């Protein structure tokens, strides 16, 4: 059997059983075996006999691939772990806003709950926060009556916030939106929540996720696209029912979350 027939038969046996890019690499490797063999003075028939029949080679490669897939599947993070990591990260993302509420205005408190619950779709929480947090000021008024009694009342006035309040609010919003991205960059595929739950974001190939993949996943996927209200619901469905428990932002960035 010459090289072209061997490679053609091997391709037919493998083309529906492994990814296209991986198949190209396999065929390239086996072509190089023939080239190096001929340089050493062996015929194509001798090289083919040394390699084994295409059917034997294909079966061996498929079995190796199945073992790798099985090991990779065992490492895939289950939705439960990811949920608890999400809750931890959602809370951390609003922690600075909680602290600021003690100094800016107590009226922020209801908006913080909306920020927390809308973490999967940030635009909703930000719209409530921006419309509430910085633009109300409490003013205390003391009223004296003729009977020498004084009554203290608190009026809530709607007015222009100070420059410092505006600056702090922008910083809080930036932290809320960028916490996941910056943390995943700095912690090599982890946030605080993922670290506590022993999870890590990896490329679909199993290699460490690149910074560009993390940007697509954490900012374009989870922050920008997820701000469309229906998208988080679709992500929840794909997370629960796809084989590798991938959310839409994982599909966008070609990543997966593994446990270790």
Image (cartoon, helix red, strand yellow):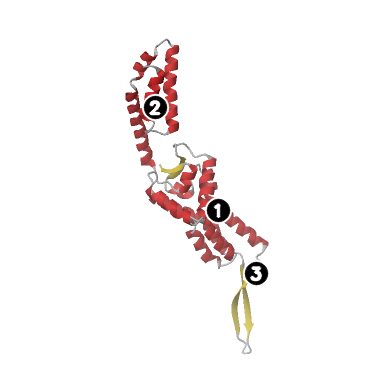
- Residue linked to disc 2: 11
Crowd band around label 1 with a 10 angstrom C-alpha radius: few (<14), some (14–19), many (20+): many
* Mark 3, other Cα within 10 Å: few <14 / some 14–19 / many ≥20: few
Q: Residues within 10 Å of mark 2 (few under 14, many from 20)?
A: some
Q: Nearer the viewer, residue 54 or 236?
A: 54
Question: Earlier along the polypeptide chain: callout 2 or callout 3?
Answer: 2
Q: Name the residue under label 3.
A: 159
Mark 2–mark 3 Cα distance, whole angstroms, equals: 72 Å
Q: Residue 145 location, x and y as percent?
A: 63, 87
Distance from Cα at disc 3 to Cα at disc 1: 26 Å
Look at the picture and state if 23 lies above or below 140: above
Q: Quadrant of the C terminus?
A: top left
Identify the residue position indicated by label 1 in the image: 177
* Pick the front one: 43 or 232: 43
Q: From the viewer's perspective, is the residue at label 2 or at label 3 nearer?
A: 2
Q: In this view, does 202 lie to the left or right of 139?
A: left
């Amino acid at each position: 059997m010459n090289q072209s027939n061997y490679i053609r038969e091997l391709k037919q046996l493998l083309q529906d059983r492994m990814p296209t890019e991986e198949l190209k690499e396999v065929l390239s490797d086996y072509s190089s075996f023939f080239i190096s063999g001929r340089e050493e003075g062996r015929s194509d028939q001798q090289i083919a006999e040394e390699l084994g029949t295409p059917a034997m080679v294909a079966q061996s490669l498929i079995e190796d691939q199945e073992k790798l897939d099985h090991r990779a599947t065992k490492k895939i993070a289950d939705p439960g772990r990811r949920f608890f990591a999400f809750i931890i990260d959602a809370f951390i993302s609003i922690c600075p806003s909680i602290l600021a509420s003690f100094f800016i205005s107590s009226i922020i408190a209801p908006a913080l709950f909306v920020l927390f619950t809308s973490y999967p779709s940030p635009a909703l929480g930000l719209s409530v926060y921006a419309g509430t947090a910085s633009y109300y000021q409490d003013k205390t008024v003391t009223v004296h009556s003729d009977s020498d009694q004084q009554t203290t009342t608190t009026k809530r006035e709607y007015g222009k916030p100070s420059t410092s309040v505006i600056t702090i609010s922008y910083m809080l919003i930036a932290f809320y939106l960028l916490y996941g991205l910056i943390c995943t960059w700095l912690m090599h595929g982890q946030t605080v929540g993922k670290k506590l739950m022993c999870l890590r974001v990896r490329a679909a190939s199993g290699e460490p996720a690149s910074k560009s993949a993390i940007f697509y996943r954490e900012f374009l996927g989870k922050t920008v696209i997820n701000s469309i209200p229906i998208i988080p619901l679709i992500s929840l469905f794909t997370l629960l029912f796809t084989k590798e428990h991938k959310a839409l932002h994982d599909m966008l960035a070609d990543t997966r979350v593994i446990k270790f």
